[in-house]
Image: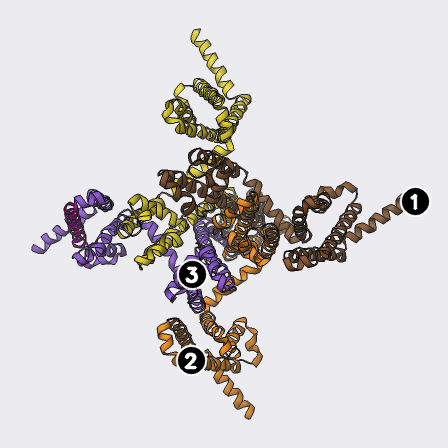
Chain colours: A orange, B purple, C yellow, D brown
Amino acid sequence: MNSKSAENWRDKISRLVEHRLFIHSVMIIILINAAIVGLETFQGIYQNNQSLFYMADRILLWIFTIEIALRIVGSKPFYSFFRGPWNWFDFLIVISGFIFTGAHFVTVLRVLRVLRILRAISFIPSLRRLVDALLMTIPALGNIMILMGIIFYIYAVIGTILYQHIAPEYFGSLGDSLLTLFQVVTLESWASNVMRPLLETSPSAWIYFVSFVLVGTFVIFNLFIGVIVNNVEKVDEMGMEQDSTLVSEKSSENEVKELRKEVQELKELLLDEKKHRSK
Amino acid sequence: MNSKSAENWRDKISRLVEHRLFIHSVMIIILINAAIVGLETFQGIYQNNQSLFYMADRILLWIFTIEIALRIVGSKPFYSFFRGPWNWFDFLIVISGFIFTGAHFVTVLRVLRVLRILRAISFIPSLRRLVDALLMTIPALGNIMILMGIIFYIYAVIGTILYQHIAPEYFGSLGDSLLTLFQVVTLESWASNVMRPLLETSPSAWIYFVSFVLVGTFVIFNLFIGVIVNNVEKVDEMGMEQDSTLVSEKSSENEVKELRKEVQELKELLLDEKKHRSK
Amino acid sequence: MNSKSAENWRDKISRLVEHRLFIHSVMIIILINAAIVGLETFQGIYQNNQSLFYMADRILLWIFTIEIALRIVGSKPFYSFFRGPWNWFDFLIVISGFIFTGAHFVTVLRVLRVLRILRAISFIPSLRRLVDALLMTIPALGNIMILMGIIFYIYAVIGTILYQHIAPEYFGSLGDSLLTLFQVVTLESWASNVMRPLLETSPSAWIYFVSFVLVGTFVIFNLFIGVIVNNVEKVDEMGMEQDSTLVSEKSSENEVKELRKEVQELKELLLDEKKHRSK
Amino acid sequence: MNSKSAENWRDKISRLVEHRLFIHSVMIIILINAAIVGLETFQGIYQNNQSLFYMADRILLWIFTIEIALRIVGSKPFYSFFRGPWNWFDFLIVISGFIFTGAHFVTVLRVLRVLRILRAISFIPSLRRLVDALLMTIPALGNIMILMGIIFYIYAVIGTILYQHIAPEYFGSLGDSLLTLFQVVTLESWASNVMRPLLETSPSAWIYFVSFVLVGTFVIFNLFIGVIVNNVEKVDEMGMEQDSTLVSEKSSENEVKELRKEVQELKELLLDEKKHRSK
């Protein structure tokens, strides 16, 4: 009896959590949270209402915690909640608000509060699907990513060896070199700020930069084309599935086959008759 | 009788407004308007002929007003004129010339006069169709725009929190941060001017910038691909509609079906005869 | 007889001009010309051999002139030579070498000599076809070019009106503004050099720049997509033509129709017989 | 007998070389090599362990040499090893480690050691296929590359002629000009650093730069589209091969043809009977 009432109780929560009003309310609270973190960036407003902002944040955190708790309780069994990656995402964003409490983590806490806006994505189904689709294209690019990684690493090591002492702000360490190469691959000031000052002491530096720009943009360019072709391919395949040609074709073929059977029966009938008569 | 003559009168205007000569004249006046606003930018010419330019502008404004008035009168019923968005566009551009009169709005007025050149788009059908087509691609990008908005907002708030005091010219307020992020997403001086000076006081700033460049360009890149795939899909669909395969297929199928019916009738005839004879 | 020998003489030239050896020789002379103009850029070499370079250039010019003359004489009728746009191109490049003679045009002459390298394009058939294909895509972009022109003109006039006195180096005149807008649309230093200094005196300048960057890149982006979709469409059409489905389909349909006719004949035969018997 | 045992011996090596454990071990050694060259870039670590790094490098080089030697011995006949371009690649990278020995080539040697990381590509089949695919797209771009080369050369010579003395750091020599043009085509600081300073002394320089940016980006843009269309074409072709429409179509047609034959036989039967009866 007790267990049954518990069941009912959880069923109710499950229904509550999936109710439009509940979802809309959470959505509005996410927007309020977004507005508050936006307002906090205005120095004047923040300084005068610091305690108000702190209170609002605590209230919002508790609302989110209760919401997540309800959703966990509402799912059967409990742990099924943690099957969806978006639920994990919601859970971690809310839980992190409790972990980094204390004066040392003020900035971390504020950034985490901002990340709660990302929950809007997990709440709008069309956005969630879009992000899922975007993330799904990443593994297909795995090999080209590894290749890009190898190219970056090789150029970074060579860059550090060659220009460590000439341009320490760009090639001082392996990390600096990687960052500089990322800047070069976005074509940002690669010549005016990075290469040209180097050319004065190392006149053959252009080989390093021009080859990297060519190789880097060529690989990115192919990455780009790969994704386009992949997508066009998918569209083509979908077009074929939707295409009723093959189905209709099949039915037409069956029609003809059955027709042939009937004509053969006809012939047999006639032959039969002929035999009959010739007797 | 009176109403009938009025009808005739409006019919005539309707015909006048759609006449090639009328449209060509308006087109030429739009070009004259374009030439005048261009000439006005030359300081020497403008200073010496200020009153002349003022008069020309008044005359052009009245010509445009009369033209719009004629087009409103010529449409049946009157309000049907306001059904087309391009008519609204023409109407507002002309009417605004009367609203902002006075010395305080000199610059506003001059800019509005320049915008009248845009009327060339509403007058050249192929251009109007092109702009319609361009604007039509925007709603399809709705979700990716919302996602981009969320990403921009989150990065802007985080940027303001972290770098407000270190780089006030770039991250001084939420608005500054949004503008800086727009600059970063166009890859303009994102490293040389924005990130590198920040790195000196905040060595981990590269995480913020590199992640934003990666996420931002990745989303724009997918927006790009989405539009291409959309368009290729449309082309494919159009190709299928033009394709007579399915239609021909259907007719072929029907042919076979009717053929089968006839063969069945034939069989019945033969069976009938057989029965008849066996009697 | 005299006219006939002339004919023979022109036939011989026609054959000579199309001979592989002749074409290869001209190609080599074009390459020599390219090498010479390249060598001339080296100050040391040029200063010491000025008269040698002058002589080489005169000789090359005369060789090209003779070559063009032979090709004109070899074509029947004479004026048919001027039907091909590439022949016009060759003719103008060579003839211009004679027009700008004299000390005043030294630089013009040197540049013209460089342009003779372009003749390599008209001599390599695959390159000529490529350039023809590239130029053919331009008229298809006509409308989007006009639209781009209108947008550039409007923004240039507004930019000149608003920022003429604040940033004279970028918006001093209509021409300066157009050049600056071209720079902005390539996203080169649009924020760091052009917009940011303006923001100090005109804080709302960001509307002008951000809107232009968005509109400009959006139009270019659509231009891009238009060309891609156009090309994919062409590929699809070619695919359809190669596709034998429709043809095969038609023949199949005809087969079924004729079959039906025969079955109808069969039925008539049987009915006829039945009637015959019932008598 | 001796030759047979040698055969066995080489067979064993051949099997060893293709064994998963052998390949995995080499892969790990390549990664260790990558880690070591990375560590060497850290000044502190390198200075204190110079002899250790030297020893590690010698050991790695000998391991690679033995590995290549085994692979050569294992292939039948010996020279078949040199048929694969990737084997050549491996061979040259390892052999070069022995050529540039000595104090004069310290930097060259260090760079070569870094290039050994590229062997990871030849060892991961999916990466090798990716690189093969990337390299395969290059010859298809041959013509557009030649065209790009001609454009670059012409603009470089003209640039050197016109701006050699005005902007020696950008157009001082043919080589400088080519490098500057490469920078311009990547749109990096083409206006702010290269063109604008030139405009002061040579006000018509914008023609040179704007035309080059337009021509250069237009050609690259077409190169891009060419590759996309090429790839889409390939996908379409593959789609058609997989498409069973044509096959099914054929069988349907044959069915109808055979059906018709049978109906004709039927008709003959009936006509035969009729004749028979009429007698």
Q: Which residue is mark 1?
A: D1
Residue at the spot 55% in from the left edge and 38% down from the top edge: D142
SS at mark 2 in the image:
helix
- The correct choice, above or below, for A171 with respect to A61 in the image is above
Q: Which residue is mark 2?
A: A54
Locate residue A229, reporting x and y percent.
53, 52
Q: Nearer the viewer, residue D276 or B191?
A: B191
- The correct choice, above or below, for C204 with respect to C33 in the image is below
Cβ atoms at labels 1 and 2 below 8 Å apart: no
Q: Which residue is mark 3?
A: B181
In 3D space, how far apart are the residues under numbered discs 2 and 3 (Cα atoms)? Answer: 28 Å
Q: Is residue C32 left or right of residue C81?
A: right
Locate residue B80, reporting x and y percent.
22, 58
Q: Is residue A170 magenta?
A: no
SS at mark 3 in the image:
helix
Mark 1 residue crowding within 10 angstroms, few (<14) / some (14–19) / many (20+): few
Q: Which mark is residue A230?
A: none
